Image (cartoon, helix red, strand yellow):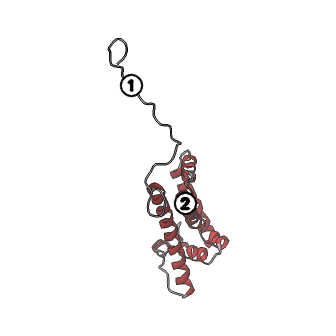
Amino acid sequence: MNEDGRVEQASPTPPVLRPAMDTAPRSAGGLQPDRWRILRSGLLILSLVAIAVLAFDFALAHTWPLPGCPFENLTGHPCAFCGGCRTLALLGSAHPLRALGMNPFVALSVMATAAWGGALVCDGLTGSRLRITLIQRIQCLPWMRLLMAAMLLNWFYLLVRVH
């Protein structure tokens, strides 16, 4: 009480200032759930690329027959993906330049997918924002048109190379 007989109200306690820290719960490995999810996604992508590349390398090394191209069987001309199996096998045996010569579109697609998986792994391990930066830069490009143009150029390359 003060001198007038009124009850004084205590002023509100100012909030305690704490340093900005990550308060997200951590998993058993010490990573936050979001970073753990990103890391798993990157490892899954890299694993699938490695399995595909090594499986075709193994198949060709043991002279297993690979499936033929139905388009080439019908028309006598290669499709845009002809040589894709051999391209994967060349990537698996560490011959990226020969793989680019076999089928540039497939080789670059596999390399880009592996690079994306690597960016996810880096983000998951270090907490960097590499994937966000890549996404922001990629979003400003007309991707469907670029992919269609690349596929048509690749097909033209294959037609010229074969004949």
Q: Residue furthest bottom?
A: 62
* Amino acid type of the residue tagged 2 in the rendering: Leu
Image quadrant in which the N terminus is located = top left
Relative side of 32 to 153, left or right = left
State yes or no: discs 2 and 1 in contact (Cβ < 8 Å): no
Instruction: State the residue position of label 1.
Output: 10
* Amino acid type of the residue tagged 1 in the rendering: Ala
Q: Is residue 10 above or below residue 45?
A: above
Spatial separation of the CA atoms under disc 2 and disc 1: 48 Å
Question: Residue 109: where, in percent of width, then height?
Answer: 55, 63
Question: Residue 61: where, in percent of width, then height?
Answer: 57, 85
Q: Residue furthest right?
A: 97
Residue 31 seen in render: yes
- Determine the image quadrant of residue 97: bottom right
Any mark on residue 91, and which? none
Q: Residue furthest top?
A: 4
How packed mark 2 is, by other alpha carbons closer than 10 Å (few <14, some 14-19, many 20 or more), is: some
Secondary element at tag 2: helix
Instruction: State the residue position of label 2.
Output: 125
